[in-house]
């Protein structure tokens, strides 16, 4: 097959992120973002490989207009989406339920199933669908591949995936733990095995994806066996604006004593909790700056964040039994040395150790931050969800073209 380019689209409710990759050498040909779609001040930023960045502001009415603006920018670089070099378009889709455990070529039936999952992903799946629909209209002849955030977690055993609630109610409303950030957990767990010089099948890894959203996963021999996010991305770790785990009784307590509605509590737990709810800031850089200046609220927010992280590390050591490595990734995990140090401090009994000098050194690329000989290696492994989506997309379309 000659076509070797894959366009990766990540469509949010008011933004579209895109990357054009050449899978022959896994190089990035262009990267861009259209944001504030539907507002008068939409903005497009576009960075072609080896060229100057471009940016403009103006009205972009909807996703259709956003993808057309993207296509025009790619055209200017001689990378037009009409090119026969383009093999497929890979779409990030947040919720694939239990059905989609693999990347999937989109047809009408797949669209309908993604639509059926909207009740469990009301913020994300509609935007993802809009992106797919628009891209299909632009290049109806091209395979559109959906890569699901939940897919990597479909290997979780029922003991980890089910909540202990009435089975009939759970099944009737598809209530179970799906997990998210799966593309990142898949990529990072595999890269961590590679860093250890092992095959993914031979490594047990705890991945800590700490961005604005945050999740942990326990990966045994390349397969996810537990993860911290659940029915929605609200469960688990303390995040930038989300509470993570709370006693579910907090919700009915608030309805009874504060008269809050379901929507108000949804907003409270998703948007006004986590680090921002605790101290007013959700950026770890700002929190560290405030801690250095002696701010007590920022200190407490940091301590609560780290305490939850340590509980999950301990839990996943127990889930896995034998752990080969703990990998930190995403904005906080890749950059915040104090978080990594505090998350692992004093856990030598369980195996992981962090070398303070290696941890503090600024570097790019996957690297170990544990001292040689640590029983459990600790690593920083930058995530690359777009590359993973492109890789999975290309593998699927190359395979299917071989069959035809
Ligand atoms: P998203 O979940 O939006 O994809 P990212 O993975 O980009 O998030 O992470 C964003 C977060 O990473 C920021 O909110 C900030 O807390 C943190 N972050 C980014 N850079 C740094 C840094 N240099 N030091 C500490 N924290 C950082």
Image: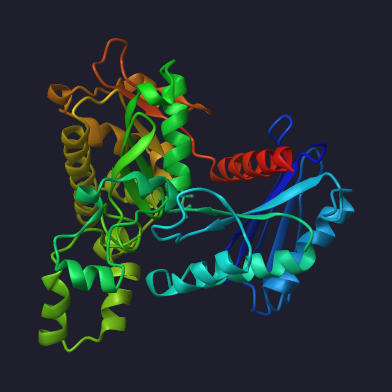
Please tell me whether residue 70 is drawn above or below residue 183 in the rendered image.
below
Name the residue rendered at 14%, 66% in the picture.
165
Q: Quadrant of the C terminus?
A: top right
Q: Nearer the viewer, residue 356 or 166?
A: 166
Q: How is the image coloured?
A: rainbow
Q: Nearer the viewer, residue 87 or 234?
A: 87
Looking at the rendering, which quadrant does residue 42 occupy? Answer: bottom right
Q: Position of residue 342 (x, y in %)?
A: 24, 35
Please tell me whether residue 168 is drawn above or below residue 48 in the rendered image.
below
Q: Nearer the viewer, residue 61 or 224?
A: 224
Name the residue rendered at 36%, 36% in the picture.
223
Name the residue rendered at 84%, 61% in the picture.
72
Q: Position of residue 122 (x, y in %)?
A: 43, 73
Looking at the rendering, which quadrant does residue 263 occupy? Answer: bottom left
Q: Quadrant of the N terminus?
A: top right
Name the residue rendered at 27%, 54% in the picture.
238
């Amino acid at each position: 097959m000659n076509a070797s380019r894959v366009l990766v689209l990540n469509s949010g409710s008011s933004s579209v992120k895109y990357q054009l990759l050449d899978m022959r050498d896994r190089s990035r040909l262009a990267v861009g973002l259209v944001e504030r779609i539907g507002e008068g001040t939409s903005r497009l930023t576009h960075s072609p490989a080896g060229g100057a960045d471009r940016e403009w502001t103006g009205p972009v009415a909807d996703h259709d207009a956003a993808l057309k603006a993207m296509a025009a920018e790619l055209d200017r670089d001689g990378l037009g989406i009409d090119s026969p070099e383009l093999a497929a378009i890979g779409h990030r889709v947040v919720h694939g339920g239990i059905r989609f455990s693999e990347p999937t070529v989109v047809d009408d039936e797949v669209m309908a199933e993604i639509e059926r999952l909207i009740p469990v992903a009301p913020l994300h799946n509609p935007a993802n669908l809009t992106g797919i629909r628009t891209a299909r209209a632009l290049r109806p002849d091209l395979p559109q591949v959906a890569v699901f955030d939940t897919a990597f977690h479909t290997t979780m055993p029922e003991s980890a995936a089910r909540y202990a609630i009435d089975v009939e109610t759970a099944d009737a409303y598809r209530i179970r733990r799906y997990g998210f950030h799966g593309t990142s957990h898949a990529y990072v767990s595999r890269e961590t095995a590679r860093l250890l010089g092992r095959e993914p099948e031979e490594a047990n890894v705890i991945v800590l994806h700490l961005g604005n959203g945050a999740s942990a996963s326990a990966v045994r021999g390349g397969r996810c066996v537990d993860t911290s996010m659940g029915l929605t991305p609200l469960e688990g770790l303390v995040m930038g604006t989300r509470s993570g785990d709370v006693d579910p009784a907090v919700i009915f307590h608030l309805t009874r004593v504060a008269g809050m509605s379901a929507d108000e509590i949804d907003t409270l737990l998703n948007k006004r909790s986590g680090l921002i709810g605790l101290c007013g800031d959700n950026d770890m850089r700002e929190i560290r700056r405030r801690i250095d200046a002696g701010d007590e609220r920022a200190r407490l927010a940091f301590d609560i964040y780290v305490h939850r992280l340590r509980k999950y590390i301990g839990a996943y050591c127990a889930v896995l039994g034998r752990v080969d490595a703990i990998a930190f990734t995403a904005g906080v995990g890749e950059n915040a040395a104090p978080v990594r140090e505090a998350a692992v401090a004093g856990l030598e009994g369980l195996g992981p150790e962090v070398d303070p000098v290696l941890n503090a050194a600024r570097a790019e690329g996957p690297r170990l931050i544990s001292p040689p000989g640590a029983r459990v290696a600790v690593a920083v492994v930058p995530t690359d969800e777009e590359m993973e989506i492109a890789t999975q997309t290309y593998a699927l379309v190359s395979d299917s073209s071989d069959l035809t």
